Image (cartoon, coloured by chain):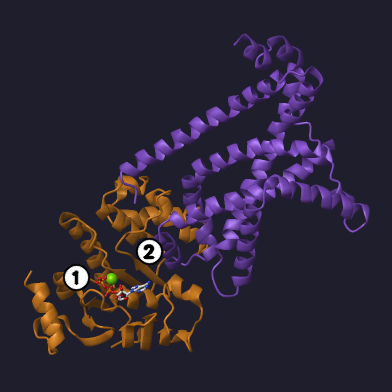
């Protein structure tokens, strides 16, 4: 038992490397927040494109569905490696400009931006499906009432359908955000010094995984309250439902 | 009779193999109140929904004020049509994330292009007219069914439509709430609004309608003054239907 504690909970080691691990976690947070915001936005755009009415919009719907299916069907790690491997190569051969090939906005490393792209593309597809479920859960009569008042499809979506859908999808979107946050650890494979990468480096030099334990604890400090928030939101909605919202 | 505001000829609509509207011809005059009755599944809702193109007809012609809004299988000037034709539904369909006042205001500003103040003043006035002065800032989930339906009425009326369509607007209401809604509709009819009313309220049809249309199996079977159609029907199917309804 003591052996176990010394292996995973070596407090002196944790104290020694606390600053470094925290720095890594700060990258994790930045990746999660920016990736999360962009994925939320991109997902909503995809969901709206997917719902465009009329025959003229059929190609748009088809392409959107194909995109969503593809990105949900590929492991994010693979998407990340394809972006990382492809963009750098294309930039080196002069096919695409540097700002996209090797992006370094705000002085952040290009691995950060490749990671943001992979998170946005992949989780945008997941979140598009969540939004879609939300949009489809809004009763048909809402669209009919809006259109019968003379609103266009776009106006009805913007003022009536999406605001209601967004309320319903907050819990599942938070769940996706938790998953996204954990998946930022994949970006370590392209040398992004986020918390898992930092912890693993410390493990390599000290032969003790306590820095990784510290990283795990930092994750839990954020994800457990988020999980509670999801439950609380769901409960709140159930209560509303029981009061009989049409 | 004054000029036709809505004129429908040869209207057809089917869902797959089910022919719901087979050949509908009718004219609605300015200021006329037409009640549409008929058995369940006869196509009454489908007719109303075709009149403002919530469903696209398969054939026939619809004219609004002499302008073709549907013909040769295509809708035309959909925006004009929907702006000029208001509709109230059996299930109210209020926007649950907006107060009564916002429900009535939103389309005025976004569709009619009224200023916020102008639209808001109009909303308050319209909600007062339907007897909801105290409920202006309530959300739909805090209103009774009858109150919700009156908000829906106010919402449609605030757009100043030329024609109002009503689809069994009292069917989802408890009996004691029906009167409030029907009273508002009576007031509208007295004020000269052109109305097409699908209803099971035979007394309302008898008192308020200028004309009653009896539909069955996708056709208009019989139409005429309420006294004639309801009091002295000519067709067997009408007699049979009225026999069932009035004996209840
Ligand atoms: N969207 C739809 N898809 C398929 N069939 C439909 C659809 N809407 C209506 N129908 C069918 O069309 C027929 C006519 O329906 P409609 O709603 O117009 O009848 P109604 O006269 O309004 O009846 P009720 O008095 O019960 O409201 C019914 O058989 C119905 O099942
Ligand atoms: Mg009906």
Q: Which chain is purple?
A: A
Residue at 6%, 72% in the rendered image: B247
| Badge 2 and badge 1 both on one subunit | yes
Q: In the image, which is nearer the foreground, mark 2 or mark 1?
A: 1
Q: Which residue does the numbered mark 1 point to in the structure image?
A: B200
Q: Residue A85 at what x, y percent from top left?
A: 83, 49
Compared across the picture, whether A233 is left or right of B219 comes to right
Task: Give the letter of the chain under mark 1.
Answer: B
Q: Which residue does the numbered mark 2 point to in the structure image?
A: B156
Neighbourhood count class around disc 1 (C-alpha, 10 Å): few under 14, some 14–19, many 20 upward: some
Q: In the picture, residue B92 is in which quadrant? A: bottom left
The yes-or-no answer for disc 1 within 8 Å of ligand 1 is yes
SS of the residue under disc 1 = loop
Image quarter of the N terminus of chain A = top right
The colour applied to the residues of chain B in this rendering is orange
Query: Which disc, if any, is residue A41?
Result: none
Residue at 53%, 50% in the rendered image: A130
Q: In the picture, residue A195 is in which quadrant? A: top right
Q: Residue A168 at what x, y percent from top left?
A: 46, 46
Residue B158, compared with residue B57, is above or below; it is above
Q: Nearer the viewer, residue A245 or A209?
A: A209
Contact? badges 2 and 1 (CB < 8 Å): no
SS of the residue under disc 2 = helix
Residue B137, compared with residue B62, is above or below; it is above
Q: Identify the mark nearer the N-term, 2 or 1.
A: 2
State the CA–CA distance, disc 2 to disc 1.
21 Å
Residue at 23%, 76% in the rendered image: B35
Q: Residue B48 at what x, y percent from top left?
A: 34, 75
- Whether residue B158 appears in this view of the structure is no
């Amino acid at each position: 038992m003591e052996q176990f504690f010394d292996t995973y909970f070596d407090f002196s080691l944790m104290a020694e490397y606390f600053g470094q691990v925290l720095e890594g976690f700060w990258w994790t947070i930045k990746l999660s927040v920016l990736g999360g915001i962009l994925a939320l936005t991109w997902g909503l755009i995809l969901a709206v494109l997917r719902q465009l009415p009329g025959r003229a919009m059929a190609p748009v719907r088809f392409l959107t569905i194909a995109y969503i299916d593809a990105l949900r069907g590929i492991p994010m790690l693979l998407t990340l490696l394809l972006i990382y491997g492809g963009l750098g190569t294309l930039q080196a051969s002069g096919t695409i400009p540097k700002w996209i090939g090797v992006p370094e906005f705000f002085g952040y490393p290009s691995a950060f931006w490749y990671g943001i792209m992979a998170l946005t593309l992949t989780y945008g597809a997941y979140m598009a499906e969540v939004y879609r479920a939300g949009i489809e859960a809004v009763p048909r009569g809402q669209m009919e009432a809006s259109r019968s008042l003379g609103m266009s499809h776009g106006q009805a979506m913007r003022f009536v359908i999406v605001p209601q859908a967004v309320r319903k999808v907050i819990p599942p979107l938070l769940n996706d955000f938790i998953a996204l946050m954990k998946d930022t650890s994949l970006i370590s494979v392209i040398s992004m010094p986020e918390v898992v990468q930092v912890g693993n480096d410390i493990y390599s030099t000290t032969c003790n995984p306590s820095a990784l334990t510290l990283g795990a604890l930092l994750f839990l400090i954020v994800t457990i309250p988020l999980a509670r928030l999801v439950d609380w939101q769901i409960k709140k909605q159930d209560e509303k439902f029981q009061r009989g919202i049409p | 009779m004054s000029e036709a505001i809505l004129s429908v000829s040869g209207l057809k609509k089917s869902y797959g193999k089910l022919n719901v509207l087979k050949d509908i011809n009718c004219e609605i005059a300015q200021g006329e109140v037409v009640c549409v009755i008929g058995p369940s599944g006869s196509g009454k809702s489908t007719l109303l929904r075709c009149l403002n193109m919530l469903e696209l007809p398969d054939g026939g012609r619809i004219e609004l004020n002499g302008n073709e809004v549907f013909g040769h299988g295509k809708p035309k000037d959909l925006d004009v049509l929907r702006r000029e034709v208001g509709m109230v539904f059996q299930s109210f369909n209020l926007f649950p994330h907006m107060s009564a006042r916002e429900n009535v205001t939103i389309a005025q500003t976004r569709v009619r292009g009224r200023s916020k103040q102008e639209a808001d003043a109009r909303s308050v006035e319209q909600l007062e007219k339907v007897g909801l002065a105290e409920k202006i800032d309530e959300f739909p989930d805090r209103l009774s069914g009858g109150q919700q339906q009156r908000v829906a009425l106010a919402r449609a009326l605030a757009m100043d439509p030329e024609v109002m369509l009503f689809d069994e607007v009292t069917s989802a209401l408890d009996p004691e709430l029906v009167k409030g809604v029907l009273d508002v509709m009576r007031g509208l009819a007295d004020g000269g609004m052109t109305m097409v009313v699908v209803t099971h309220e035979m007394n309302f049809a008898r008192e308020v309608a200028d004309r009653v249309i009896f539909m069955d199996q996708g056709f208009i079977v019989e139409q005429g003054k309420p006294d004639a159609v309801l009091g002295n029907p000519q067709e067997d199917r009408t007699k049979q239907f009225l026999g069932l309804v009035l004996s209840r």
